[in-house]
Structures are given as structure tokens and as C-alpha cells.
């Protein structure tokens, strides 16, 4: 299977799309451990990496995988690992070290239901873990949330560029639905990896001063200074990298906020309910960290209410409330444990918030 | 007058953070000497563990990388796969390698990863004040075995060389000690063999070094060396456990 023809449409699962995109983005080092529902990534890598002279290792543990990513990133290469929720929990120590050593890499989380072993169906219950740091210490990973198979590919290209640009781990936060479903994909036509010069990387100190990759600061004051530097970087990312998509928000009475699979469901709701007496719009965060707070705040000043829709018990809604800061009521509708909100349920929830005269019936 | 014995260029001239009588400093020096003598300073990448030797990069003037506790062989793997032409070694203590990093060391050896592991075994967690290590001897007193290590509660000292030598992917496995000039010379020879194993692309090598920790053994430096020779070497016999040159 070669997927390198430009401008050609391929029918792929989201998992295959993001694996292939990584290869086309110049990732040559992949380390993974089997866990459903993301196994197609590991499988694709074991087929494709040898074709491009890359390395793919099925490792003994999630810990080994993330730490091999750490090593390859420290050595200056584009490296990636992937897993699903329980496996991502295991990787958190390593992600904290990657952030602490300022190493660029990409981590894919194809979320499944939790807590614990949970199940293998779609979920968005790892939001807190993804956007609030996840491991120990004051750090952030950049978190990108695709909502189609095409975006599963597109955002992986961006993820590698962002990682290198900011020397920071980037997470793609998908879910079982996005990972498993098949849609047509066209790979980024003009993409050429922006391979930045990594003069900090470990390559052997031949003809130069030695490089050290570390996150340990034993001299008093050094760690606080380093943290200040990290926070400055995070503020820059917040100022420059926020991404979102707006649908029908201009004159909306109610605005939905949803990402990933839930954003698709919300879009379907908008398509099916164009003649409602209340006008409904949608804000879809594409970056979950940095979170699109400004646009949500702006919209909150002119709408009756905001409704956050998630496949969780209410996680992103906390960031929505922080953004809104009491300017309008913020409501929440969520399903957990593999349950997915339906357009009909969203309509019901909206009708609890405002008086809704239905001109068309929602059929789903 | 010409100096006949100089400090190795790769060894950074700086005050040591190691305790009096500790073996790490001497092992660092041996590594620096070997890097100089093999002329591989520009192509060597070292890995520092979590533990007393986390600051190994303060002493060795080469590219170095820190790793999370026990994950050192995995990080080394990630580096070596990117730079197969470089010399990659991990430097690990007994807690790092034989407790929290047991899975990583076994699977790195089993993949036959072409790296060199320098395993400093002092039978105790030094950095955290002297708790029991996986290699603490039966009846040995530590902070967390105040009445001595008991088989019943704490299990047995883990013999890493014996364990790794039966793994198909390993190529050179040896145990040595730092108790006398003779043993230090022997240690240097074995370390050289470890680096040679890697440079000749033979695969995974590990050299275990029995090393004194007088402070947490509550012994004098001389007593510590005696303890290694008379007690520790009984549980951890010195010798070459596996050698690719003597294999069919």
C-alpha cells in the first residue's frame, strides 16, 4: 500500500489517515503498543516505515514507547507514538519529561470510554488530562482536535510543525469514532516538512560544545527561572495558535460549543433544524489547548445561552464557563461510557433552555 | 618535565557531588579515559539515570541525555535508532535498572539493541538516603530493612547478569568490581569490550560494576571494599557471563 499520490482520494480509516500523514510529514520514528481502538496506526506504521527507511517498533509497554519517542526527539528526529486512553495515562510521566526537556513530538490519543479499562467505544473523557497537562508539573501540550478523517490527516502535518516550532509535545485528541470510520482523504498537496535546525539535539559533540537534554535543575532558583521561560512560551502559543471554526454564530440565539465527533453531530443538528424559531450556531474548537476563549467570550456577550455538548460528564464545559465568566448561562449536555449525543437529544436540551417552536421535525 | 599521567580530556575538572568513598567518580573517569583512548568523544552520546548519577553529565564532556527513572534503555534505544553510527551508552544504578526499569532493560537486551549499559550496583538507593535496593543482600541492613533484608518480606537480591545472559539478544554480559587497582583495571578492560561490542555492531552489552556506598552502608571506605570482596561478590560472582567472541 503506497499512499503517496498527490491529489488522489484514498478511502481510509482515521487511524490510517493520521499514520500516513505522519510519514508524509517526515516522521521516521514510531513506537507503539497495541490497544483498541487505535491498532490501525501501529499496523500501518509497521507496513509503511520500512518502505521509507524509517523505524517502527512494537514495544513492550506504553512507557517504553513514550521514552523511545523522547530519545528520538532528543536525537533531532520527528517521532511519534499513539495509544488510547488507558495507554495515554501510562505515557503521562514521559509526556511531562518531554515538556520539561522541551522536546518536540506528536502523540495520538484515540479516546475510548473510561475510567479504568472502560470500553472501546468513542469518548471525550480524556479532555482534562489532555489540556491541563496530564502528568506532573506546570506544563501544557498543544492539543489538536480533528473532527473528520481528512482532519485526522491534516492536523498531523500541523502537529509536527507546531511541535518543532515550539519545542513542545503536541497531542492529537481523536476518539474511537474518528479512528475507526472510513472517509475519503486527500493528503496535503503542497506540504513540505519545515525541518527546523535543531542545534540543541544530541548528535555527538563533534566540533562543537556538548549538548545536554534534561529537565532536572538542582541549583536553587534555576527551576523557577526555567518554569518562567516555559510559561512565556505557553503565552506565545496562546496568543498565536488558537484555532476554531464558527458556523452560523453571527445572529445566533444559542451557540453550541463542541469538538471532534460531537461537533459533527452538532453540525448535523444545525443542518436538520434550519427553520427553528431560535437560531442556533456552533463554535468548534480545533485547538483544545490553547483554548479559543476569546471567541467564546465575544459570542457570550450577544447570545441567550451557550450549550456545550461532549461525550463526557462535563469537562470542556469548565473551560467554556471560564471563558464566558458569567456573561450568559452555560448549559451542558453530555453522554458517557460510549453513549453519543444525538441531534434529537440536542434539540430536547435546547428546548429546555429556551422556548423552541419547531417548524421542522428532527428525525434522528 | 613531561607529564606521564594526565586527567582525561573528556573528564570535566569540577568539584564532585559524590560522597567520600563512592565508586561513581572512578567509573566516570574510566569512561572518560576510554572515550579519549578510542577517540570517540565526538560521536558518543551518554544517558544519565535517576539516582545518584543523575548528574553524570556534570563530569563527562560529551552529548548527554537525562531519562526518567528506569526508562534509560528506552531513551537510549530512541537515540540509537536515529543515530546508528554513534556510540550510545546508558549509565544506570541498581534501583533504576533492576527495580523500576526491569521491563526496559530486559526488552532492550532482548531486542539486541546495539547499545552499551554500564550498571553500577551498590546494593542500596543512595540518593534517597539508603533504602533497600533490588540488589540488597539477604540480612543487609538499610533504611527500609532495619533488621536486615528478609527473603520472606522482601524477596531475594536480583542477579541481573545471570538474568540477561540467558536472553538471546544479549551479546556481552560481565560483572566486575572496584575494590582494588587490579579490579579497576579489569573493569576498564570490560568497559572497553562493551564499547567495542557496540562499535563492531555485535549488539547489546552490559557491564555490572559492584561499587561501594560507604555512607549508606554505614562503613568506612576500607570496610566497604572488604564488604564487596567478602560478601557482595558471593551473591554477585564476578566474571564474564556472555561473550560474543566465545560463542559459536
Image: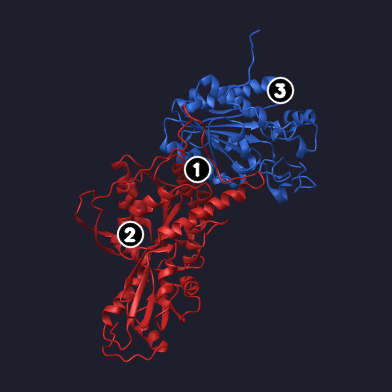
Chain colours: A red, B blue
Q: Quadrant of the N terminus of chain B?
A: top right
Which chain contains the residue that carries disc 2?
Answer: A
Instruction: Please tell me if label 2 and label 3 are on a single chain.
Output: no
Q: Name the residue beneath numbered marker 3.
A: B180
Q: Quadrant of residue A281?
A: bottom left
Say few, some or many: other residues with alpha carbon within 10 Å of mark 3 (under 14 / 14 to 19 / 20 or more): few
Alpha carbon separation for disc pair 2 and 3 = 61 Å
C-alpha distance separating marks 1 and 2:
28 Å
SS label for mark 3: loop
The residue that disc 2 covers is A152
Residue at mark 3: chain: B
Q: Give the percent coordinates (x, y) of residue A89.
A: 51, 59
Image coords of residue B176 (percent x, y): 64, 28
Choose top left, top right, bottom left or bottom right for residue A40: bottom left
Residue under numbered circle 1 = B74
Q: Say left or right for B101 vs A118.
A: right
Residue B82 to residue A85: above or below: above
Image position of A255 (left or right of B23): left
Residues under labels 3 and 1: Cα distance? 33 Å
Which quarter of the rendered picture does the C terminus of chain B lie within?
top left
Q: Is residue A114 above or below residue B207?
A: below
Q: Residue at x 28, y 42 (%)?
A: A51
* Residue located farthest toward the top when viewing the structure as drawn: B1
Q: Is residue B146 left or right of residue B192?
A: right
The circle on residue B224 is: none
Have a look at marks 3 and 1 and say if they share a chain. yes
| Above or below A115: residue B216 | above
Relative image position of residue B143 (x, y in whole percent): 76, 47
Q: Secondary structure at mark 1?
A: helix
Q: Nearer the viewer, mark 2 or mark 3?
A: 2
Q: Nearer the viewer, residue B223 or B229?
A: B223
Q: Position of residue A11 (x, y in %)?
A: 23, 59
Amino acid at each position: 500500500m503506497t499512499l503517496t499520490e498527490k491529489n488522489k482520494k484514498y478511502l481510509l480509516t482515521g487511524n490510517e489517515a493520521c499514520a500516513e500523514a505522519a510519514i508524509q510529514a517526515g516522521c521516521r520514528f514510531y513506537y507503539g503498543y497495541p490497544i483498541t481502538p487505535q491498532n490501525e496506526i501501529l499496523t500501518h506504521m509497521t507496513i509503511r516505515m520500512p518502505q521509507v527507511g524509517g523505524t517502527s517498533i512494537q514495544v513492550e509497554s506504553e512507557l517504553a514507547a513514550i521514552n523511545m519517542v523522547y530519545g528520538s526527539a532528543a536525537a533531532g528526529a520527528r517521532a511519534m507514538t499513539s495509544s488510547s486512553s488507558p495507554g495515554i495515562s501510562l505515557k503521562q510521566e514521559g509526556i511531562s519529561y518531554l515538556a520539561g526537556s522541551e522536546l518536540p513530538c506528536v502523540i495520538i490519543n484515540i479516546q475510548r470510554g473510561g475510567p479504568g479499562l472502560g470500553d472501546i467505544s468513542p469518548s471525550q473523557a480524556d479532555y482534562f488530562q489532555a489540556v491541563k497537562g496530564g502528568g506532573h508539573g506546570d506544563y501544557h501540550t498543544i492539543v489538536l482536535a480533528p473532527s473528520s478523517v481528512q482532519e485526522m490527516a491534516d492536523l498531523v502535518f500541523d502537529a509536527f510543525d507546531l511541535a518543532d516550532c515550539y519545542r513542545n509535545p503536541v497531542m492529537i485528541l481523536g476518539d474511537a469514532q474518528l479512528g475507526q470510520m472510513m472517509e475519503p482523504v486527500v493528503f496535503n498537496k503542497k506540504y513540505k516538512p519545515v525541518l527546523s535546525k535543531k542545534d540543541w539535539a544530541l548528535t555527538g559533540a563533534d566540533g562543537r560544545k556538548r549538548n545536554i537534554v534534561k529537565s532536572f535543575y538542582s541549583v536553587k532558583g534555576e527551576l523557577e527561572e526555567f518554569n518562567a521561560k516555559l510559561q512565556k512560551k505557553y503565552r506565545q502559543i496562546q496568543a498565536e495558535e488558537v484555532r476554531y471554526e464558527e458556523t452560523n454564530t453571527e445572529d445566533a440565539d444559542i451557540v453550541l460549543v463542541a469538538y471532534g465527533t460531537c461537533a459533527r453531530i452538532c453540525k448535523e443538528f444545525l443542518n436538520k433544524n434550519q427553520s427553528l424559531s431560535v437560531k442556533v450556531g456552533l463554535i468548534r474548537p480545533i485547538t483544545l489547548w490553547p483554548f479559543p476563549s476569546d471567541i467564546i467570550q465575544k459570542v457570550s456577550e450577544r447570545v441567550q445561552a451557550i450549550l456545550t455538548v461532549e461525550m463526557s460528564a462535563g469537562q470542556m464545559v469548565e473551560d467554556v464557563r471560564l471563558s464566558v465568566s458569567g456573561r450568559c448561562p452555560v448549559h451542558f449536555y453530555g453522554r458517557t461510557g460510549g453513549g453519543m449525543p444525538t441531534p434529537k437529544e440536542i434539540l430536547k436540551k435546547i428546548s429546555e433552555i429556551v422556548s423552541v417552536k419547531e417548524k421542522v421535525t428532527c428525525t434522528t | 618535565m613531561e607529564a606521564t599521567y594526565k586527567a582525561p580530556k573528556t573528564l570535566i575538572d569540577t568539584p564532585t557531588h559524590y560522597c567520600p568513598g563512592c565508586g561513581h567518580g572512578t567509573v566516570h573517569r574510566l569512561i572518560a579515559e576510554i572515550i579519549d583512548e578510542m577517540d570517540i568523544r565526538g560521536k558518543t552520546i551518554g544517558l544519565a539515570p535517576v539516582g545518584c548519577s543523575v548528574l553524570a553529565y556534570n563530569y563527562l564532556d560529551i552529548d548527554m541525555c537525562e531519562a526518567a527513572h528506569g526508562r534509560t534503555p528506552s531513551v537510549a534505544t530512541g537515540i540509537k535508532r536515529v543515530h546508528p553510527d554513534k556510540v550510545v551508552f546508558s549509565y544506570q544504578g541498581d534501583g533504576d535498572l533492576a527495580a523500576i526499569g526491569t521491563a526496559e532493560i530486559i526488552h532492550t537486551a532482548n531486542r539486541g539493541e546495539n547499545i552499551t549499559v554500564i550498571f553500577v550496583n551498590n546494593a542500596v538507593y543512595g540518593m534517597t538516603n539508603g533504602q533497600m535496593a533490588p540488589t540488597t543482600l539477604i540480612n543487609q541492613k538499610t533504611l527500609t530493612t532495619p533488621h536486615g533484608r528478609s527473603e520472606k518480606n522482601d524477596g531475594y537480591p536480583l542477579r541481573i547478569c545471570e538474568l540477561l545472559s540467558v536472553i538471546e539478544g544479549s551479546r556481552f554480559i560481565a560483572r566486575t568490581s572496584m575494590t582494588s587497582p587490579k579490579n579497576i583495571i579489569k573493569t576498564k578492560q570490560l568497559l572497553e569490550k562493551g564499547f567495542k561490542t557496540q562499535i563492531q555492531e555485535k549488539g547489546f552489552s552490559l557491564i555490572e560494576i559492584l561499587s561501594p556506598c560507604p555512607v549508606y552502608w554505614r562503613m568506612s571506605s576500607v570496610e566497604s571494599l572488604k564488604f564487596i570482596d567478602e560478601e557482595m561478590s558471593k551473591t554477585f560472582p564476578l566474571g564474564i557471563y556472555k561473550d560474543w567472541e566465545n560463542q559459536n
